[in-house]
Amino acid sequence: MQTIVIRIEYDGKPYAGWQYQPNAMTIQGALEIAFKSISGSEVPVVGAGRTDSGVHARGQVAHIRPSISIKMPPEKIIKAMNSNLPKDIRVNGSAVLKEEFHARFDAAAREYSYSVINRESVFLTRFATYFKYPFNPAALFESASVFEGEHDFTTFSKNNTDTRNYVCKVEVCKWGEAGPGQWKLRIKADRFVYGMVRAVVGAMYDVARGKRSVGEIGHALQKRDRNLSSPLAPPQGLILEKVYYNKELKFVTV
C-alpha cells in the first residue's frame, strides 16, 4: 500500500489546533481538504503530534494512505498541496513510501522550541511570548535541568482521557539567548503529553520571577499532582521544530 509522507510548517494562530473539528478551522482539516482536491478521495491525514490551538510548527510530519495510489512524484505532491492550502500552511517536504509507516507511532522523538521576549515587538510577538513581568534569566536557565531525564509529567500536563501514562524521557531541556532581550528553550523527548511544554515553561517562568524555587518545582514534578502546577505559558511561543525517526525519511523539497 502506498504511503505519502509530508512535512508541514504552519502558523497556528488562526487555527483551533491540529486535530479535525467539525465546526472550527484546524490544520488537519485544511490538509485533508487540500488532498481531496488533488486526489478526489477523502482520507485522513495523520500527524506525528496534535499541536494545540495557536501552536506553530516548522517540522510537523504526517502520513496519508490513499485508497488508490497517486501517480504523482513527491515534488508535484508538494506543489499541488500548496496550491490548495491557505498561505499560513505550507508543505515543505514529501516522500512516497511502499513500506508501512505511521507518522505518530513510528516517531522516536520530537523536538519543540519555546521563545520568549522581554519587550513587545511588532515583528516577534506572533511567534514569541512577551513576558511582561521582570524576570531573572539565570534562574530561568537553572530551572530547565529539573525536567531532564525520565519523569512522570502528570503535574505539568493537562488531563487527557486518551493518555495511559504520563512518563516521558526528556533528552534535552535547555534555554539559550536568541538575541537582545530574546530567549529560546529547546526541549526534546521521546514523547510529550498534552500541554506539557507550556506547563513546564509556565513553571520555569514562576521560578524566574521568584515566585517558586527550583527545588519546589522539582518536588511538584515528583508528587504527580496538577494542583501543584503553574499557569500554562501562552501558545504563541511554542513551535514543533522536528520529528525524529529511527529510519531516516528522505524528503524531496522544492
Image (tube, rainbow, N blue to C red):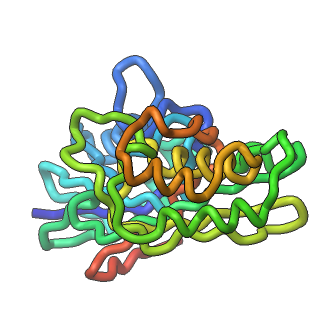
Does residue 102 appear in the picture of this structure?
Answer: yes
- Which quarter of the figure is the N terminus placed in? bottom left
Does residue 93 appear in the picture of this structure?
Answer: no
Q: Residue at x 23, y 49 (%)?
A: 165
Q: Residue at x 50, y 43 (%)?
A: 85
Residue 51 vs residue 145: left or right?
left
In the rendered image, the vertical position of residue 109 relative to residue 90, given as above or below: below
Residue 97 vs residue 242: left or right?
left
Q: Position of residue 223 (x, y in %)?
A: 37, 47
Nearer to me, 245 or 94:
245
Residue 44 vs residue 231: left or right?
left
Nearer to me, 60 or 227:
227
Q: Residue at x 49, y 30 (%)?
A: 16
Q: Position of residue 83 (x, y in %)?
A: 51, 48
Q: How many marks?
A: 0
Q: Which residue in the rendered view is the most extreme toward the top?
A: 23
Determine the image quadrant of residue 88. Answer: top right
Determine the image quadrant of residue 113. Answer: bottom right
Q: Position of residue 228 (x, y in %)?
A: 48, 38
Q: Position of residue 119 (x, y in %)?
A: 89, 47
In the rendered image, the vertical position of residue 59 relative to residue 162, given as above or below: below
Nearer to me, 134 or 196:
134
